[in-house]
Amino acid sequence: MNTDKVKELDRNYLFQNYGRQELCFKHGEKEFLYDLDDRRYIDLVAGIAVNSLGYAHPAITQIIAEQSKRLIHVSNLYLVKEQAEAAAALASVCPSPLSSTLFVNSGTEANEAALKLAFKRTGRSRVVATYNSFHGRTSGALSVTGQSKYQEGFEPLISEAVDLIDYGNVEQLKDAVTKDTAALILEPIQGEGGVILAEREFFRTARDLCDERGALFICDEVQTGMCRTGRFFGFQHYDVVPDIISLAKALGNGYPIGAIVTSGEIASTFTPGAHGTTFGGNPLGTAIAKTVIETMVDEKIDAQVAEKGSRWMSMLHDIMDRSEGRIKEIRGQGLLIGIEMGKHAKDVQTLALDNGILVNVCAGSVVRLIPPLILSESSILAFNDVLNQFLE
């Protein structure tokens, strides 16, 4: 089947709710994707920060094959061995007291579960979130997403229990967290918002205020978690430990899975019947998640990412210095990098595609680099060449 036939089927039988590029891939290996005509692309999108161990990683393909022959799904009405093992693996890479996991199917579901847990735990009525954030598209997660473009047309579903502040604004944060606040939800880096970082003081203040005023601190690690920033979790760069973290994306390396992790005490708030999911924590998904965690630990992916990211950022800053102002800023941590290009971001994306490199544009003006974490030096240099080519 060729691309034109896929386009026809897409047009005739699918919702047209995605702004798709006219590309279709048939297989991948490491950080490379191959289209239906066998053209190879360097993938610096990774399924939007999902395929962190790349494509066809032998440990992942092996566990999928083995587990799918044994057991793919069984209800949460029963004990699930793979689920318990994955939770133990996750606890082993989380700082204390984060030790209890609830598995779900996506990042949106993880944030929904985190919010429900916070409201039930505290009995309070409000939540603090930030402008320019992104937490998901179901009603609760959408309500705390501080970008109106995602909410337009869905206003009846949007909660009015949300207090929005500017990301990184300490004084607004101090005013917003009150005795009525059930939770404060923050991204360690605003990924969809344009790769925006906060100062350490903002996160330290967030932790202190939640302790002082009895609110729960939720860190949305859906994009930043699982070694993306050079640490296992983004919050570790700020020397704080939140009360609840939400995970997804890289946790399954392409298999749909999400999770929240919290302390045993907070987890006890959810008693049987309080929250649940049919598919969350199924044997196949959690066997994959356990393998992802073990592989990241064994291969020291966090340290690799810290080194690669630091080196790549240095190279990009050198290019920016020669850009005569066309590159406005380089931002990021680890292998979550944003290149602020203003109106030229889409032009860079097009030129990269012409050279067989896939990049993502977010927030309208930022070239976002979120590649597989196993990215090779040659692929880094190939993108740098394209960026230099654009500037020339």
Image: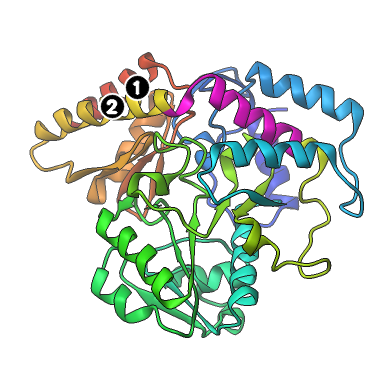
Residue at 35% x, 66% y: name it. Answer: 208
Whether residue 312 sits left or right of residue 335 in the image: it is: left
Tell which of 273 and 43 is nearer to you.
273
Secondary structure under badge 1?
helix
Q: Position of residue 372 (x, y in %)?
A: 49, 29
Tell which of 45 and 282 is nearer to you.
282
Report whether residue 16 is seen. no
Magenta stretch, main secondary structure class:
helix
Q: Position of residue 106 (x, y in %)?
A: 65, 52
Q: Which amino acid does the dot numbered 1 rest on?
A: Ile
Q: Position of residue 1 (x, y in %)?
A: 73, 27
Residue at 56% x, 79% y: name it. Answer: 158
Q: Which amino acid does the dot numbered 2 rest on?
A: Trp
Bin the neighbour count of mark 2 within 10 Å (Cα to Cα): few under 14, some 14-19, many 20 and up: some
Whether residue 384 sits left or right of residue 44 in the image: it is: left
- The residue labelled by disc 2 is 312
Residues under labels 1 and 2: Cα distance?
7 Å
- The residue labelled by disc 1 is 380
Residue at 62% x, 40% y: name it. Answer: 90
Quadrant occupied by the C terminus: top left
Q: Is residue 104 magenta?
A: no
